[in-house]
Structures are given as C-alpha cells and as structure tokens.
Amino acid sequence: MPNTLAQRIASCTACHGEHGEGSPGTGFFPRLAGKPAEYLARQLRYFQLGLRRYGPMEYTVRPLTDTYMHEIASYFAQQEVPYSPSPTPKVSAALLARGQALTEHGDPERKIPPCQACHGSQLTGVQPSTPGLVGLPYDYVSSQLGSWRTGTRAAAAPDCMATVANRLTPEDITAVSAFLATRQLPADMHAQPPGSVTPPLQCGVLGNAPPAEAPVKGDGA
C-alpha cells in the first residue's frame, strides 16, 4: 500500500470527497476544503475527546496523533475546489426571511447575536479558527445546532455556540439552516483575516474568555 497522504486520508475522502468538497448529494457530509486549518484540527481532537459525538468520526480519529491531525487539517485547508449546491428544504418565504434576519441582525431582545458577527460579513469564516457557513448543507447545519442544544457537540468553555443554539427555537434553527443553504455564494470564499471581527460573546475557542479566577488559599485547589 503506498505511503502517501492521499492513501492515508482515504477514510476522510470516502465521505467528504477527494479534496474535501463534501457530498452535496447526501445533504449531510460537510465541506472541509478551505476551512481554517486550526478549526479542522480542533474538531478532530474534539471527536477524540468525546466533545463531538458521531460514531464513524470517533472511530476514525481514535488512533491519530496531534501531528497527524494537523497534517490532515492543513491538507484540506489548502484545497480550493468549486462549490456544488446541496438539497434544500421547501420552506416558506416568511421562514427564509426569518433566517436571513437572524443571520444578518440576530435577535437583540433574546440576546441572539447575528451569525455574521462571528463567522464574517460574508459568512466565509475568520482565520485562524472560525469556520465558514455558506455552502454547507441544510441537514448538516440544522443537525449541528441541534447537537449543541442536546449536548452531543461542545467546545472549550465558555462554549458560545452552545449559548446561541440554546437561545434558538426549533423553528429558528430551521430558518437559519434553510437560509444559509440557499444563500448565494460570495465571489471570494476565503476566510477573513485574523482580528477582522470582534466576537460579541466570550468564546473559549477564540481565546477571548476572561482569565480563570486565582484559587483561594485553603479552598482545596
């Protein structure tokens, strides 16, 4: 068996495509190509740690080293392949409008920030660790938001995505997922440069969480 990266990542490309283009026809397996390498490597690690739960992925990453996971992540981050449309649900114009409003403006009364506030003005992601949302299948987006609500997906504390997802109603999730799946792709799909957005919430993965309090003498720490 040839010892090449292409051979070694065959278990990845079987579902996510030869170059990480995803599998639009299924409506589920997400695109990996072009996503920030740090984000991709972290997700592989989360599957190892049980912070993300999906049997095939947990099995695949179990024996991988950190070095190898970063090698895989770097490969897919560097891939540039065309986007293909994914199946979209039949939803009303009113629900799509609701999804657009949440994506672009959020819902201040319910303390829901817009998706664009963290994922970039064109929703193409932000380097080094925030993924793009445009071009993702409806089924994938809705399932991941649901996973944050049920605790089967998590991230470093404070988990800002879990906070947002739990402020969304099931109808909101349908609306946002449908709008993102049908949104026209921007001309430039590259992630925005580091520091180009100021996240409205404290997120452990972005390193903007407040420092942990120093242990108090005598508290058993």
Image (cartoon, rainbow, N blue to C red):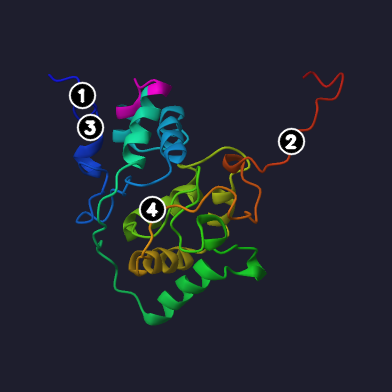
- The extreme left residue here reads 1
Q: Classify mark 3: helix, strand or loop.
A: helix
Residue topped by disc 3: 11
Quadrant of the image occupied by residue 6:
top left
Q: Contact, CB < 8 Å: mark 4 with mark 1?
A: no
Q: Identify which residue is drawn at 42% across, 28% down.
A: 48
Front position among marks 3 and 4: 3
**In the displayed structure image, the side of residue 50 where residue 55 appears, left or right:** left
Q: Quadrant of the C terminus?
A: top right
Residue topped by disc 2: 211
Q: Which mark is residue 4?
A: 1
Q: Residue 86's x, y, as percent?
A: 25, 61
User: Residue flagged by tag 2: what amino acid is it?
Assistant: Pro
User: Residue flagged by tag 1: what amino acid is it?
Assistant: Thr
Quadrant of the image occupied by residue 39:
top left
Instruction: Please tell me how crowded label 1 is: few (under 14), some (14-19), or many (20+) other residues with Cα within 10 Å.
Output: few
Q: Contact, CB < 8 Å: mark 1 with mark 3?
A: no
User: Residue flagged by tag 3: what amino acid is it?
Assistant: Ser
Work out whether mark 3 precedes mark 4 in sequence or the reverse, and give the earlier one.
3
Work out whether mark 1 precedes mark 3 in sequence or the reverse, and give the earlier one.
1
Q: Residue 171's x, y, as percent?
A: 45, 68
* Above-or-below relation of 68 to 26: above
Q: Which residues are magenta?
A: 60-67
Work out whether mark 2 precedes mark 1 in sequence or the reverse, and give the earlier one.
1
Work out whether mark 2 precedes mark 3 in sequence or the reverse, and give the earlier one.
3
Magenta highlight on residue 66: yes
Front position among marks 1 and 3: 1
Q: Classify mark 4: helix, strand or loop.
A: helix
**In the displayed structure image, the side of residue 198 where residue 2 appears, left or right:** left
**In the displayed structure image, the side of residue 160 where residue 28 appears, left or right:** left
User: What is the distance, in whole Å, between disc 2 and disc 1 at their CAs?
Assistant: 42 Å
Residue topped by disc 4: 143
